[in-house]
Image (cartoon, rainbow, N blue to C red):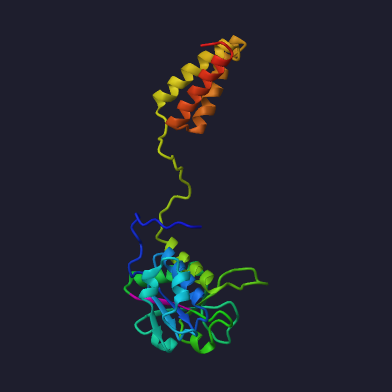
Amino acid sequence: MAGTDSTQESLAGGAGPAIILVRPQLGENIGASARAMLNCGLTDLRIVNPRDGWPNPQAVRASSGADTVIENARIYETTGQAIAGLERVFATSARPRDMVKPVMTPDGAAREMRAAEAEGSRCGVLFGAERMGLENDDVVLADTLIEAPLNPAYKSLNLAQGVLLIAWSWFRLADETPELRMDLGGTRPATKDELLNFFTRMEAALIESGFLYPEAKRPAMIRNIRNMFQRMAPTEQDLRTLHGIVVSLFKHRGGG
């Protein structure tokens, strides 16, 4: 989904976990990961020993404008150096490890990170190389493993997908976007007096056309029709269009 709007205020600002890419192979994957980070307001990118060196033109191109993440990325020789200054470290993994560590879902880990941040602690998340993931020597430096509940027969994610999954789990805990909204496209909800005016005009037309027959059932029919339009919650533009339809139909049949 494309959606860059330079008129909107960015949510990026230094809060949130550091994203630590350990021995990433392709610059394109680093750039796509930076893009995923900025989607969720994260900017602290740390890269351990990238295979193709740094800076990387492919990473810049693949970041699709996430320049602030790429330009401020920090490069380290070892994972130990990259996690310096962090109090809580999580490691992503899709395969069993021969070590005793708590394993959390992305949502559970995100809540832990939010709680730690609220207490003033910095967190980081380790992501391994595209081909083999994290080595055990990297995982042992983490406090907690993160494992996403995916198809047990196929848990393979590319690097940027993994970053987006964790970053979005963190981001949405503070997001208050309503689950549903109606984009009105420049119009507004119709007022009740506008709606009643339309009802008066439409019902007069329906009486003239003979639709509201027999007369004994007319009040119930009118109530049903009014309820139908009330459920639609029409906009002011909708009513103008409906007025036009009524006028057009009666002009066509020789009415007023």
Q: In the depicted view, which residue is nearer to us: 156 or 245?
A: 245
Q: Is residue 102 magenta?
A: no
Residue 149 image offset from top left, x and y in percent = 58, 69
Q: Main secondary structure of the magenta part?
A: strand
In percent of the image, x 45 and y 76: which residue is there?
Answer: 57
Residue at image point 51% right, 32% down: 231
Farthest residue, direction front: 57
Q: Please name whichever residue, 232 or 143, is drawn nearer the observer in this view of the structure.
A: 232
Does residue 123 show up magenta in the picture?
yes
**Residue 48 percent location from the top left of the image:** 44, 84
- What residue lies at 55% left-to-right and 81% top-to-bottom? 133
Q: Residue at x 45, y 26 (%)?
A: 240
**Quarter-of-image position of residue 216:** top right
**In the displayed structure image, the side of residue 252 where residue 58 appears, left or right:** left
Q: Position of residue 83 (x, y in %)?
A: 40, 83
Q: Quadrant of residue 157?
A: bottom right
Question: In the depicted view, which residue is nearer to us: 56 or 133?
Answer: 56
Please indicate, yes or no, whether residue 229 appears anywhere in the rendered image: yes
In this view of the protein, which residue sits in the foreground, 32 or 234? 32
On screen, residue 62 above or below 212: below
Please determine whether, in this image, residue 70 is positioned above or below residue 51. Answer: above
In the image, the segment drawn in magenta is 121-126
